Each structure stands twice: as C-alpha cells, then as structure tokens.
C-alpha cells in the first residue's frame, strides 16, 4: 500500500463518488456530452427490432434514453436518487416518460433478473465504480444470469495497464459548471493511495460551491475504485461462459490490442 497522505477512513466511500446531489447530476450532464459510445452500441445491437435491455449504473440516462428513443424497452439500475431524478426529468420532454423504468438500488444488493433481457449494458467505466475484484466479477455474473440465452453483454472500460503507483498524486478537475440556480460547482480529485496487491485506489474529492451571492462552501471526502484492464475483463467473461464476439479498442470500432485506450466487449451468452 502506498499512501500520499492519511485518508479519513470514517469519511470513505466504497464507491468512486457520491452522485446523489442534484447539482452534481446537472453538471455531470454538462460535462459528459460524448455520444460515440452510444453510436458504437447502436451499431452492435443492429436492426433487431425492439429489444429488452438492462443498463446497470444508468446515471442520468446518457446511454439509456437514446436506446429508449430507438424503441427498445430499457430498464435501469442506479444507486443515486439525484441521477435517477435527472434522467426521469429528461425523459419527459422526449415523450419517453411512460417507458421510464429505473430501479433505485445498489447494483450488488440483489439479482438483476432471470433470463429477462436481450442485452445488458455496463457502459462508461462502470466497473471502475467498484472497489474490489469480487464486486466487479459479481457484476459479470449478475449480467449473465439476467441475459436470455444468446443475449449480449456490452462492457466498456478504460484499458488500465500502467502500474497503479504511476497514478499516485495525480490531480484533476473532475466536474465544473454553473447550475441553473446560478451556483458554481467544481469537483477536484487527487489520487491519494494505491494498493498494487488488490488494485484499490483511493481518490480524495473536494466538492466546492459558490452561490450567486458569493457564499463559498466545500466538502472533502475519500472515494474508492479499482481500475481494470481489458485482459481482466476478458478472463471474467470467459469464466462466466460468454463467447466474445467483438473487442474494440476505441469507439470507432478499431480492433483492441493490449495498448488500446479502451476495452469494449460485445459478448454473447451461450
Ligand atoms: C460514471 S456514472 C455513469 C452513468 C452512465 N452510465 C453514463 O455513461 O453516463 C456511474 C453511475 O454509477 C452509479 N453507481 C455507482 N455505484 C453503484 C452501485 N453499486 N449500484 C448502482 N449504481 C451505482 C453512480 O451513482 C453513477 O450514477
């Protein structure tokens, strides 16, 4: 274990962040505007008619809502009520409110289904949200159980291959923007400890607010995640009996190699 400074154990989240804040959900949507992953997923799904799709870690609906608009039946699983509220509010003007269906709960708390879905989506670094191999593998297992035979799992993560110690001390602005009420928010993040033995990475986050009247406040807390490599995800998919049909190293669909920036799997349940 390598630590940069002492972390506040009592203030430690076992997830990669606390997304349960309306302003954070709003600024998440201002920041995460990319849609290339959705385009790739749509091309993998193809023109198979209306499918039953489950998206776990559905957030503000960045992936889920376009799939709903395509005519699929999409169920979400999301732990943060504020993210769910925002996705529901976005569904309404799109005429999709009647099809909106998200379970607000911890993904690991109960099964996702018993052969109810044609496609399960674990998009946008979902596995990085979790702090242990056990939890990450459990997601692949739950996806497998939820899929019908011949159903597909889409798993998209950064392909993390560098030694974790290289990320120690890295700091960045994770989110920054102005809410509709005029409050400015900025979330900064710094990697403060890494454990090469199990991959646990602790990030200290600082959530800073400035109201239109100029009042400032901030909160500091530590969060946990576990970066994954494409090789690891491949081994878990194989362990749970998936046939890997396609592996892309980017959203353009370029074939994956060990140096690829991303590891995007399209795997079929046998
Ligand atoms: C980075 S966001 C991605 C959201 C969405 N998939 C996207 O691509 O925009 C990750 C989401 O996972 C949710 N999350 C994290 N841990 C979770 C858990 N154990 N169960 C359910 N949701 C979780 C967070 O609240 C957050 O909304």
Image (cartoon, grey):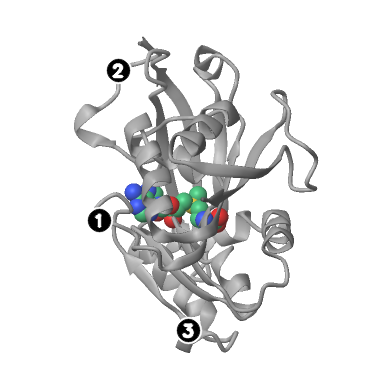
In the rendered image, residue 160, in percent from the top left (x then y), is placed at 58, 26
Q: Is residue 236 left or right of residue 1?
A: right
Q: Is 95 above or below relative to 231?
A: below
Mark 2 closeness class: few <14, some 14–19, many ≥20 residues within 10 Å: few
Judging depth in this view, the residue of 96 and 257 nearest the camera is 257
Residue 18 appears anywhere in the view? no
Q: Residue at (37%, 30%) from the top-left corner? A: 133
The quarter in which the N terminus is drawn is top left
In the rendered image, residue 132, in percent from the top left (x then y), is placed at 35, 31
Foreground disc of the pair 1, 3: 1
Q: Which residue carries the number 2 mark? A: 6
Circle 1 SS class: loop
Is tag 3's residue or tag 2's residue first in the polypeptide sequence?
A: 2
Is tag 1's residue or tag 2's residue first in the polypeptide sequence?
A: 2
- Mark 1: C-beta under 8 Å from nearest atom of ligand 1: no
Q: Which residue carries the number 3 mark? A: 99
In the rendered image, residue 141, in percent from the top left (x then y), is placed at 38, 45
Q: Is 161 above or below relative to 87?
A: above
Q: Quadrant of residue 57?
A: bottom left
Q: Is residue 103 left or right of residue 227?
A: left
Q: Residue at (68%, 54%) from the top-left corner? A: 37
Circle 3 SS class: helix
Disc 1 from disc 3: Cα separation: 23 Å
Judging depth in this view, the residue of 16 and 269 nearest the camera is 269
Q: Which residue carries the number 1 mark? A: 110
Disc ID at residue 47: none
Judging depth in this view, the residue of 260 and 34 nearest the camera is 260
Disc 3 from disc 2: Cα separation: 47 Å
Q: Quadrant of residue 11?
A: top left
Residue 7 appears anywhere in the view? yes
Foreground disc of the pair 1, 2: 1
Q: Residue at (74%, 61%) from the top-left corner? A: 43
């Amino acid at each position: 274990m390598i630590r940069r400074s002492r972390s506040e154990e009592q203030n430690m989240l076992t997830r990669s962040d606390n997304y349960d804040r309306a302003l954070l959900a709003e600024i998440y949507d201002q920041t995460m505007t990319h849609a290339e992953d959705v385009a790739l997923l749509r091309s993998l799904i193809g023109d198979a008619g209306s499918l039953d799709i489950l998206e776990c870690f559905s957030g503000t609906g960045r992936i889920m809502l376009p799939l709903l608009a395509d005519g699929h039946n999409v169920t979400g699983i999301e732990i943060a009520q504020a993210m769910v509220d925002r996705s529901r509010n976005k569904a309404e003007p799109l005429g999709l409110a009647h099809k909106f269906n998200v379970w607000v709960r911890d993904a690991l708390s109960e099964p996702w289904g018993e052969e109810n879905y044609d496609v399960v989506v674990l998009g946008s670094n979902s596995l990085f949200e979790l702090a242990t191999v056990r939890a990450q593998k459990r997601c692949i297992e739950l996806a497998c159980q939820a899929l019908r035979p011949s159903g597909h799992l889409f798993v998209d993560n950064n392909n993390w291959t560098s030694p974790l110690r290289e990320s120690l001390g890295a700091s960045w602005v994770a989110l920054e923007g102005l809410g509709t009420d005029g409050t400015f928010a900025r979330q900064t993040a710094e990697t403060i400890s890494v454990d090469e033995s199990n991959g646990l990475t602790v990030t200290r986050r600082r959530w800073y607010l400035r109201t239109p009247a100029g009042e400032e406040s901030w909160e500091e807390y530590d969060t946990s995640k576990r970066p994954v490599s494409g090789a690891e995800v491949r081994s878990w998919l194989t362990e749970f009996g998936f046939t890997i049909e396609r592996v892309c190293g980017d959203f353009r669909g370029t074939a994956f190699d060990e140096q690829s920036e991303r590891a995007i799997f399209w795997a079929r349940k046998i």
